[in-house]
Image (cartoon, rainbow, N blue to C red):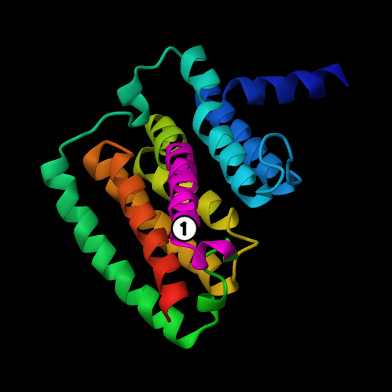
Amino acid sequence: MLKVLKAYLDEMAKIDRESALIIIYSTSVLLFAMFMKRTHFFMPREIFLERLLVVGTLYGLTPFVLFLAFKRAPKDYGIVTGDPRSWLKDVLFLYLLFLVVLVIAFKFTGLKQVYPLSRRAGQSIGYFAIYQAVQLWYMVGWEFFFRGFMLFGLERKFGRFSILIQAMAFGLAHFKKPQIEAYGAVIAGLFLGMLALRSRSFLPCIVLHYMVVLTADVLGILL
């Protein structure tokens, strides 16, 4: 019995500790966010917006526990601006590509019935602005979690294969979304991962992802 236990402990000791903790922690946070019931802490009349704020904070700030534990510099997790003159070209190209896909999807599927996720956002310009501000906060945390913390954290051990790992997790995080969007999220995750590694920053991923989500909201209102 003790020999078997020792054998398992020896196998565990061979696993890279930082990579293992990043994967275990990321999986736990994703599961927690998926199963978390809607909160009523500080915006009882705006449950959906409160959830975006809470989950965005969970994604964006809690990974810093491991960030500090491993004594990493900000740039080690993509927390740098990179070269905007270079990555803005990539962002524009990918946005136009995603825009074509979005228009086709909204025209021929039921996605226009889904966006904006907050139905009130389509009824008032003022509320739409508030919703977008909250959604931007959510996107910052979301992108840091996948394209900062996971991608760059795992790159040290897995190299560019980390793009596939975070894209898989990113796709699974969309399991409550429409089926076509969930499948598309896997492909989008690959492009976002490549964009982050090319620029050595997760900042362009925030810009691109938010532009796509904002466009989806506008299309959902106008079409």
Residue labelled with disc 1? 128
Q: Secondary structure at mark 1?
A: helix
Q: Quadrant of residue 172?
A: bottom right
Quadrant the N terminus occupies:
top right
| Residue located 51% across and 13% down the image | 69
User: Is the residue 103 above or below the residue 4 in the image?
Assistant: below
Nearest to the observer: residue 171 or residue 155: 171
Residue 64 lies within the magenta run: no
Residue 145 lies within the magenta run: yes
| Residue located 42% across and 63% down the image | 187
In this picture, residue 85 sits left or right of residue 192: left
Amino acid beneath label 1: Phe
x and y percentages locating residue 7 in the rendered image:
73, 23
Main SS of residues in magenta: helix
Residues drawn in magenta: 120-146
Nearest to the observer: residue 172 or residue 16: 172
x and y percentages locating residue 50 in the rendered image:
63, 43
In this picture, residue 142 sits left or right of residue 218: right
Q: Quadrant of residue 13?
A: top right
| Residue located 52% across and 68% down the image | 115
